[in-house]
Image (cartoon, helix red, strand yellow):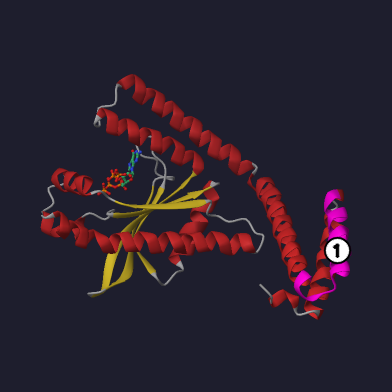
């Protein structure tokens, strides 16, 4: 197949990956803008290279004419979570959406692979709009914790280096590393609530400070300068004192002042 032909075939997959990365990043923003903990920590995506598609098609004896139906990970999205519980929350978020239809799912967390690999895989059908019309594509979504990702990235690169024949000693080390990663995930799950509470409180404070700064900046455009300078000094005092309760009170008071000046709608 000519390279131009490959490009035309793979282009919609690249669009699907870009769109899905944007959508999952919006979910992160949605939680964080509310000052809440996001079950998604980060998201990345990739389209399989032409050489790996050909390699996979050869390995699985797939005819090139039907590789789009038979290779379900041409488009791949990887969602990284902090805790195992978050993975299942993300699966439910995806299940509830109308723009992706789950076609297949594999839980390699409950059913750990012989290699020690853990992750949750979904194959979803996703529509993209192209110049030729709507095209339904398969996208593989891998959902895993930071710890699982650390292990599988290293193991994957070793598989690549040793072409599936990883020496026994390294394989044994990988197996014990997989156990350590499993323990780490379990330990982290024990303190999940405490960590979430700390992160929520940090984010809420960061959002509040950011809102206060925007309000003060807007007030400079419409209110008396001397008044705004005294508001700003009051804020700096409270901020430096670090008393959260006082900061909340100040934020509410400032919201009222800004509303009176119609300053909240200014850019
Ligand atoms: P790459 O280079 O990541 O694309 P399939 O291969 O999807 O047709 P299979 O093997 O039943 O069928 O699917 P599975 O087991 O769900 O694996 C799909 C992907 O999960 C793999 O894609 C890997 O990315 C990842 N994966 C599965 N098992 C392992 C493992 O033991 N170690 C690591 N590091 N990753 C794994 P590809 O195409 O194999 O590779």
The residue labelled by disc 1 is 229
Picture quarter with ligand 1: top left
Q: Indicate left or right for 29 with 193 as reference.
A: left
Q: Position of residue 209 (x, y in %)?
A: 74, 59
Is residue 22 or residue 114 the one in the foreground? 22
Q: Is residue 26 visible from the viewing direction of this image?
A: yes
Q: Position of residue 95 (x, y in %)?
A: 44, 65
For the point 74% across and 66% down, which residue is it?
A: 217
For the point 20% across and 56% down, which residue is it?
A: 70
Check the image and report above or below for 261 versus 8: below
Occupied quadrant, residue 166:
top left
In reply to whether residue 228 is colored magenta, the answer given is yes
Locate the N terminus and report the quarter of the image it occupies: bottom left
Is residue 6 or residue 108 the one in the foreground? 6
Q: Residue furthest front?
A: 225
Q: Indicate left or right for 135 with 255 as reference.
A: left
Locate the C terminus and report the quarter of the image it occupies: bottom right
Q: Main secondary structure of the magenta part?
A: helix
For the point 54% across and 39% down, which residue is it?
A: 185
Q: Which residues are magenta?
A: 220-240
Q: Is residue 115 visible from the viewing direction of this image?
A: no
Q: Indicate left or right for 114 with 88 as reference.
A: left
Check the image and report above or below for 267 versus 151: below
In reply to whether residue 43 is colored magenta, the answer given is no
């Amino acid at each position: 197949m000519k390279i131009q032909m490959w490009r035309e075939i793979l282009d919609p997959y690249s669009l699907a990956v870009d769109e899905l990365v944007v959508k999952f990043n919006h979910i992160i923003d949605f939680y964080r803008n509310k000052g809440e903990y996001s079950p998604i920590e980060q998201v990345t995506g990739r389209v399989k290279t032409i050489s790996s598609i050909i390699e996979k098609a050869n390995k699985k004896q797939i005819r090139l004419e039907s590789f789009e139906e038979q290779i379900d990970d041409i488009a791949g999205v990887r969602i990284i979570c902090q805790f195992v519980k978050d993975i299942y929350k993300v699966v439910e978020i995806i299940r509830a959406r109308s723009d992706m239809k789950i076609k297949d799912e594999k839980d390699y967390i409950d059913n750990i692979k012989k290699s020690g690999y853990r992750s949750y895989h979904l194959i979803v059908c996703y529509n993209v709009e192209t110049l030729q019309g709507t095209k339904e594509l398969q996208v593989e979504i891998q959902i895993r914790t930071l710890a699982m990702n650390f292990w599988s990235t290293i193991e994957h690169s070793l598989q690549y280096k040793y072409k599936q024949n990883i020496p026994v000693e390294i394989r044994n080390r990988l197996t014990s590393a997989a156990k350590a990663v499993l323990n780490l995930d379990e330990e982290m799950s024990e303190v999940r609530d405490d960590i979430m509470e700390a992160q929520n409180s940090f984010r809420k404070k960061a959002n509040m400070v950011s809102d206060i700064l925007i309000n003060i900046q807007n007030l400079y455009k419409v209110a008396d300068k001397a008044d705004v300078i005294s508001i700003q000094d009051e804020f700096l005092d409270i901020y430096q004192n670090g008393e959260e309760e006082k900061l909340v009170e100040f934020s509410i008071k400032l919201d009222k002042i800004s509303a009176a000046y119609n300053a909240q709608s200014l850019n």
